[in-house]
Amino acid sequence: MKVLVPVKRVVDYNVKVRVKSDGTGVDIANVKMSMNPFDEIAVEEAVRLKEAGTATEVVAVSAGVAGCQETLRTAMAIGADRGILVETDAELQPLAVAKLLKALVDKEQPKLVILGKQAIDDDANQTGQMLAALLGWPQATFASKVVIAGQGEEMRANVTREVDGGLETLEISLPAIITTDLRLNEPRYATLPNIMKAKKKPLDTVKPDGLGVDVAPRLKTLKVAEPAKRQAGVKVADVADLVAKLKNEAKVI
């Protein structure tokens, strides 16, 4: 069984992002970039499936600028067998990414696509669902546990997902789309020997035009602004003072 794992290059979660002075977006110049944490969990899960003998090959995929090769090498250091980069300088929105992934799925014919439920830069949480719709495949989102059972055409995935009321378990037939939540696993650290091995693993580069996909943005960002700064709190002497301030200053009572 081949597993396809899309990974996204984002600003590292430890970095405090800065908004550009003209309000057109986030400043990423000279900022540390890394793999989206949810995608890292997806890579780990795919590698565990391979180690268990369920998967035969793990293919990492990324779309974006040439710097995404570093993200793919990280995925291969964790355990992916090879990488594919859809190289483009265009602003990629969820629908465009889903269309690119569909084209790669049609080409690679995987049985399973595992990806993070969302990226920490835009928090869109749309790509996995859009990909499932484009392919007409079943989907299980926000997975906290994945168990693959059966053989051949009878292969199925039992996916436990966290919902408001507790845990929900779905059984879906393969091929399918699964998106990962934080509690699915704890990604391993890439060891130095594996980092060196990853440099020798195959990494193919294609263009959106080569896949027959139009990645022109459908949405336009009008303005990006930082959240308003919270005002400092005040101390009150007693309950009467608190009530007075709530009534006269805050005007909430």
Image (cartoon, rainbow, N blue to C red):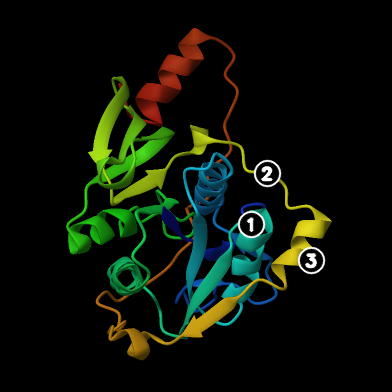
Q: Residues within 10 Å of mark 1 (few under 14, many from 20)?
A: few
**In the image, is 127 to the left or to the right of 202?**
left
For the C terminus, give its image quadrant. top left
Mark 3 vs mark 1, CA separation in Å: 30 Å
The vertical placement of 161 against 56, above or below, is above
SS of the residue under disc 2: loop
- The amino acid pointed to by label 3 is Met
State the residue lying farthest toward the front.
152
Q: Nearer the viewer, residue 193 or 121?
A: 193
Mark 2 or mark 1, which is nearer the start of the sequence? 1
Up/down of 120 relative to 205, above or below: above
Write the residue at 33% across / 84% down: 211
Please name the residue shown 55% across and 10% down the image: 238
Q: Which residue is mark 2?
A: 188
Q: Nearer the viewer, mark 3 or mark 1?
A: 3
- Label at residue 16: 1
